[in-house]
Amino acid sequence: MYLKILYVDYEAQFAIIEFIGEWNDCLYNDIMYLKENILDLMIQKGICKFVFICENVLNFHGSDDCYYEAIHEDIVDEGGWMVMLNLLEHVEDEMRRTYLQAYVNMFNDVDWRRQKPQFLEKTIENLLSGKTLELN
């Protein structure tokens, strides 16, 4: 799996990361590498809100949810969250079969490309609270 860190705002404690390729926790433990090599460093700097752009994740092979739970525990006390955006249907189905929805929120059909990062953060906050937001 490849990733691009698109945006980080240390004051807002917010990061946007885009993923590309095959997410394979079963064989390669991608989530462990993500947590230990990227997310833990960001969490140490105060980042607790993560948007994972997943529209280019072509396959997901789950294992267990231990690392997702650990990340969730690291950020939830800080008011943080993890959100996966625009998953392909079969990828989301496999993630749900691995019970990741207990730790990661999943939203589809979010037009993130035309939004400034600060507005995307507000959009996500509204989705998490169940509010709708008009795009201006």
Image: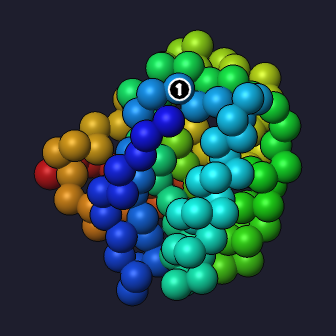
> Observer-nearest residue: 115 or 16?
16
| Left or right: 112 in relation to 63 | left
Q: Position of residue 17 (x, y in %)?
A: 41, 52
Label tally:
1
Q: Position of residue 57 (x, y in %)?
A: 47, 28
| Left or right: 34 in relation to 2 | right
Q: Residues within 10 Å of mark 1 (few under 14, many from 20)?
A: some
The residue pinned by badge 1 equals 22
The residue shown at (47%, 77%) is 13
Q: Position of residue 31 (x, y in %)?
A: 67, 46
116 is higher (above) or lower (below) than 52:
below
| Left or right: 33 in relation to 63 | left
53 is higher (above) or lower (below) than 120:
above
Q: Amino acid at mark 1?
A: Glu
Q: Secondary structure at mark 1?
A: strand
The residue shown at (47%, 47%) is 52
Q: Is any atom of residue 86 visible in this view?
A: no
The residue shown at (84%, 37%) is 64
87 is higher (above) or lower (below) than 35:
above
Q: Is any atom of residue 70 visible in this view?
A: yes
The furthest residue to the top: 90
Scheme of colours in the image:
rainbow
> Observer-nearest residue: 36 or 76?
36
The residue shown at (56%, 19%) is 59
Q: Position of residue 70 (x, y in %)?
A: 79, 61
